[in-house]
């Protein structure tokens, strides 16, 4: 099975072009499954042991329904790969009901929180301020932001070329405010850094490319200073989507801005205010 596992990872990374983070998740989830069936099921992959695995994730690992679904999805992909290679006869997870994921309204920052965040970010430094601005104004993923290169920014045409999930390229348009902030950052603070000649847009004095960990640390520090109880950059992506939607942008355009392949994913990102729901209800006339 280890040989098939290695072939599967190569297929997903080199042929399918999945992102590094997605590949890491696949590897982690599938290795966990292989270890489970090896140690607890004598290597037997069948429906009975598939059910045992799901129970193990829930009871022993304490995984949430969303995490269980993500892990089984990864394992399912691997099983299908093995079936095509004729190393496994049937999919043991087929027709097995997975834990239901409870519906939650997506969390996004309100206008007051955004104002507080930008206020503390502006006091921090030019790089961290423009990083915060870009997340809010463009809805970039963290991996997309840290991989931005100087050549990806087209100042003349006010756009950024982004390489998203699955190595898909998309264009994000930016306004004059962001253009000016990027110019200031590149001409001032970035020009004084050790790795100023790096091809990457966001750098530090220690590395030629800012790390994913460092971006997370920067944002979490800013949230704390702004008295906002949240973490990570994903909430800024959801804030961007919600702000666009409430401003009248249609959902198909938002889907393209965010780089979603499925419009259902975009719908999940958008937080619709209770006032909007009430307004919709009152507008109905028959």
Image (spheres, rainbow, N blue to C red):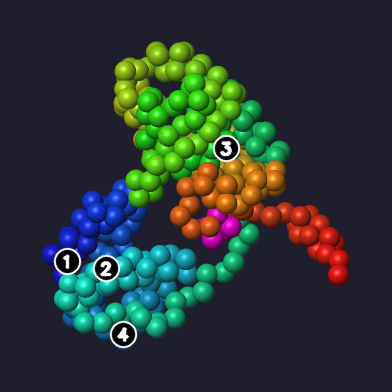
CA gap, disc 4 to disc 2?
A: 15 Å
- Crowdedness of circle 4 by 10 Å Cα count: few (<14), some, many (20+)? some
- Crowdedness of circle 3 by 10 Å Cα count: few (<14), some, many (20+)? many
Q: Which residue is identified by label 2?
A: 78
Q: Magenta residues, as a range?
A: 264-268
Q: Which residue is identified by label 4?
A: 47
Frontmost of labels 4 and 2 is: 2
Which residue occupies 32% across, 52% down? 18
Which label was assigned to residue 136? 3
CA gap, disc 3 to disc 4?
A: 45 Å
- Tell me if residue 247 is in the magenta stretch: no
Report x, y in % for residue 172.
Answer: 50, 36
Q: Which residue is identified by label 1?
A: 4
Q: Quadrant of residue 116?
A: top right
Q: Quadrant of residue 111?
A: top right
Callouts 3 and 4 close, C-beta under 8 Å: no
């Amino acid at each position: 099975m280890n040989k098939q596992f290695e072939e599967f990872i190569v297929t997903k990374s080199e042929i399918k072009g999945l992102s590094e983070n997605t590949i890491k998740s696949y590897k982690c989830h599938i290795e966990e499954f292989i270890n489970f069936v090896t140690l607890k099921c004598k290597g037997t992959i069948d429906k009975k042991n598939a059910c045992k695995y799901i129970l193990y994730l829930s009871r022993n690992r304490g995984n949430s329904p969303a995490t269980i679904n993500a892990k089984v999805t990864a394992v399912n992909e691997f099983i299908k790969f093995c079936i095509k290679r004729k190393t496994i006869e049937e999919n043991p997870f087929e027709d097995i009901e997975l834990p239901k994921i409870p519906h939650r309204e997506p969390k996004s920052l309100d206008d007051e929180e955004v104002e507080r965040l930008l206020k503390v970010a502006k006091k921090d430094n030019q790089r961290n301020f423009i990083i915060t601005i870009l997340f809010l104004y463009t809805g970039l993923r963290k991996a997309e932001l840290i991989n931005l290169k100087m050549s990806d920014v087209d100042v003349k045409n006010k756009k950024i070329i982004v390489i998203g999930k699955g190595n898909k390229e998309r264009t994000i348009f930016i306004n004059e405010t962001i253009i000016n902030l990027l110019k200031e950052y590149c001409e001032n603070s970035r020009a004084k850094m050790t790795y100023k000649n790096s091809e990457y847009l966001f750098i530090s004095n220690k590395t030629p490319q800012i790390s994913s960990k460092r971006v997370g640390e920067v944002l979490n520090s800013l949230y704390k200073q702004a008295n906002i109880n949240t973490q990570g950059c994903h909430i800024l992506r959801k804030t961007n989507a919600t702000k666009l939607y409430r401003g009248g942008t249609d959902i198909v355009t938002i889907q393209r801005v965010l780089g979603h392949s499925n419009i259902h994913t975009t719908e999940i990102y958008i937080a619709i205010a209770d006032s909007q729901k009430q307004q919709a209800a009152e507008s109905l006339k028959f």
